[in-house]
Image (cartoon, rainbow, N blue to C red):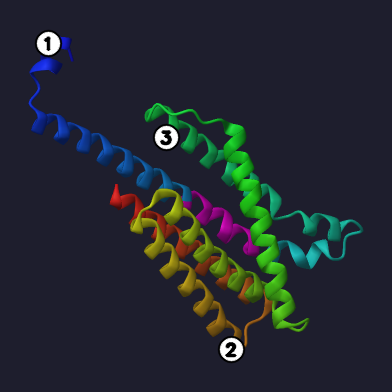
């Protein structure tokens, strides 16, 4: 746009142009956030499923307990790596300064928050609780927390409502599963699918906002 055309731009059209730019910002953020949830859907589903599949033979291995203690980590690292690239692209598209280190730091902070929530849930449910169900309930509570945090960051209802609904659904779904006589394998696969599906659908809904 030349200086001459800028000078000739009527005030109403200038305001409209600024509004369109702000709308583009919000739409791009919504789509990036939705894609982030869809990526994490696979990691969230894979964690309990991989534990369920690996536990029978890792428990009999000499170093099986060590492997089980960090089996979740590769899934989270992979998800953070992919979504970090997404958010870096998002920042570049909007002409903002963002470093990969910032994205990794945010991912580490949320991981610590989840561990704290999971610890509190396990203590509250007692030692006889099903670990997979406890992790599912923790995931639901963590999802609600994400909705509250990101709605404040973005000042947007399109973040809060879908995540609160998803988190509540995950918690209630796992409570229902706790009343069913499931084998450990069945509990792991079922709660993994429940959480993964909830995140994927929620991410798709939010991305449609864009």
Question: What residue is disc 3 on?
Answer: 90
Question: What residue is disc 1 on?
Answer: 4
Q: Nearer the viewer, residue 98 or 185?
A: 98
Q: Percent position (x, y) of residue 49?
A: 63, 63
SS for callout 1: helix
Magenta part of the chain: 37-49
Q: Earlier in the sequence, mark 2 or mark 1?
A: 1
Q: Percent position (x, y) of residue 189?
A: 59, 69
**Is 108 placed above or below 21 here?**
below
What's the mark number on residue 120? Answer: none
Cα–Cα gap, marks 3 and 1: 31 Å
**Is 141 placed above or below 89 here?**
below
Q: Earlier in the sequence, mark 3 or mark 2?
A: 3
Question: What residue is disc 2 on?
Answer: 179
Quadrant in which residue 4 is drawn: top left
**Residue at image point 17% right, 32% down:** 17
Q: Nearer the viewer, residue 149 or 66?
A: 149
């Amino acid at each position: 746009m030349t200086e001459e055309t800028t000078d000739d731009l009527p005030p109403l059209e200038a305001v409209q142009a600024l509004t369109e730019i702000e709308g583009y910002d919000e739409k791009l953020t919504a789509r990036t956030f939705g894609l982030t949830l869809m990526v994490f859907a696979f990691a969230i589903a894979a964690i309990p499923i991989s534990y369920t599949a690996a536990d029978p033979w890792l428990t009999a291995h000499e170093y099986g307990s060590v492997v089980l203690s960090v089996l979740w980590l590769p899934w989270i690292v992979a998800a953070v790596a992919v979504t970090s690239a997404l958010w870096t692209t998002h920042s570049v598209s909007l002409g903002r300064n963002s470093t990969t280190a910032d994205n990794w730091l945010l991912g580490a902070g949320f991981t610590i928050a989840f561990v704290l929530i999971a610890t509190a849930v396990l203590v509250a449910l007692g030692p006889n609780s099903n670990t997979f169900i406890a992790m599912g309930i923790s995931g639901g509570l963590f999802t609600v927390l994400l909705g509250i945090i990101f709605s404040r960051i973005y000042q947007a209802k399109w973040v809060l409502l879908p995540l609160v609904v998803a988190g509540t659904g995950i918690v209630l779904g796992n409570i229902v599963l706790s009343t069913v006589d499931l084998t450990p394998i069945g509990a792991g696969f079922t709660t993994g699918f429940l959480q993964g599906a909830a995140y994927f659908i929620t991410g798709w809904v939010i991305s449609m906002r864009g």
